[in-house]
Image (cartoon, helix red, strand yellow):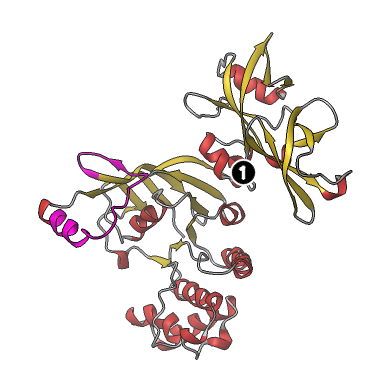
Amino acid sequence: MAEVILKNIKKVYPFVSGEDKKKSKKKKADQPEKKKVNLQITDEGVVAVQEFSLDIKDKEFIVLVGPSGCGKSTTLRMVAGLEEISGGELIIDGKVMNDVAPKDRDIAMVFQNYALYPHMTVYDNMAFSLKLRHTPKDEIDRKVREAAEILDITQYLERKPKALSGGQRQRVAIGRAIVRAPKVMLMDEPLSNLDAKLRNEMRAEIIKLRQRIDTTFMYVTHDQTEAMTLGDRIVIMKDGYIQQIGTPQEVFNHPANLFVAGFIGMPVMNFFDAELEEKNGKYFVKLHDYEVELSADKEERLRKNNVKSQKITLGVRPDHTDVAEKGGVEGKVEVSEMMGSSVHLHVNADGKDVIIIVPTQDLKENFNIGQAVRFCFNGNVAHVFSKETDKNLEY
């Protein structure tokens, strides 16, 4: 349906005037001052999004993910036209859209809070945008019922939103968006108000929906599980900047920096203060007395970047960390969590919490609190990050 191109998009919120500041201070005099975090301050104002560039292919499903305040929802709202673009270009289907009104962009948006009209039935909520466009009644009826069938809400068409569950309301909100057959579908944390079971169900429904409608998706979430399962590509953001763009597998296997490595993956990656040693063209990571040679592909990338011996931050994922019978690094068990198919061991090693995932089928003994254990890892799963820049030294 449409290719979406964002070229160096920027969003700056200007400082309020002196008079507005006085009013704001007077109004909040009795309230504790809230400390602003993750905001870049310039002479222009507060920068929420900086140098955001992304080419989204036709019918691609792109997920923007990151912590609260990273600029992902602001970026989506700029695409929707709900926020003014401070700099850069937004191009949809070959046309520059910076100054085009939201209603003329041929986009549809699904909000976190559903935004349904409470006095209207499900049918009327879904038909509303088509009525505004003076679409013929028979065409409205056909489109509404087609969307309702896709989303399995035909039986609720005559109900009002208050008579529906959260998951059903979200289906209605999605249905209202797809009846218009928009070129671009924008979704701003649509599942965050649902409980865990409903979230899983709706995530599966969105995957099915994507196969049935031909449109380009931009989806915002802070939930990495949603990002990993839904996206063709993931855009990871922090403090208004893009940290990495890639397929779910790429960002999981090859994190660009410490932030991405710590954000993507559950449980979070284990990090250690270690050393990278280059010996005769080979690369080794050394953690205390434990030394491991990196895999051939990792060594090749480090050689290509002319990386020298140095102190590093070593990252190893919990499911790539194994209990060792001998050798390895020593630690003490602090917590043992039975998770059904696996046991998560929290081990204290030099004051750091190290998580080791042991599949129950490989469990040879029960681990007791305070028990000494040793753990190890292979060179093909070790990630090496610069102490100075936090960047992955392989890339």
Displayed quadrant of residue 39:
top left
Residue occupying the point 81% across, 25% down: 327
Residue 225 in the image: state x and y as whole percent: 60, 54
Q: Is residue 336 visible?
A: yes
Residue 119 in the image: state x and y as whole percent: 38, 88
Residue 135 in the image: state x and y as whole percent: 37, 82
Of 329 and 305, nearer the camera is 329
Drawn side of residue 377 relative to residue 166, left or right? right
Amino acid on which the number 1 mark rests in the picture: Val
Of 156 and 56, nearer the camera is 156
The outermost residue toward the left is: 19
Residue occupying the point 72% across, 27% down: 379
Q: Is residue 94 visible?
A: no
Of 39 and 13, nearer the camera is 39
Of 38 and 151, nearer the camera is 38
Drawn side of residue 167 relative to residue 135, left or right? right
- Is 17 above or below relative to 206? above
Drawn side of residue 213 relative to residue 364, left or right? left
Q: Which residue is mark 1?
A: 268
The magenta segment: 20-45
- Is 171 above or below relative to 97? below
The outermost residue toward the front is: 370
Displayed quadrant of residue 111:
bottom left
Disc count in the image?
Answer: 1
The outermost residue toward the top is: 280
Q: Is residue 32 magenta?
A: yes
Residue occupying the point 74% across, 36% down: 332
Quarter of the image with the C terminus in it: top right
Q: Is residue 47 magenta?
A: no
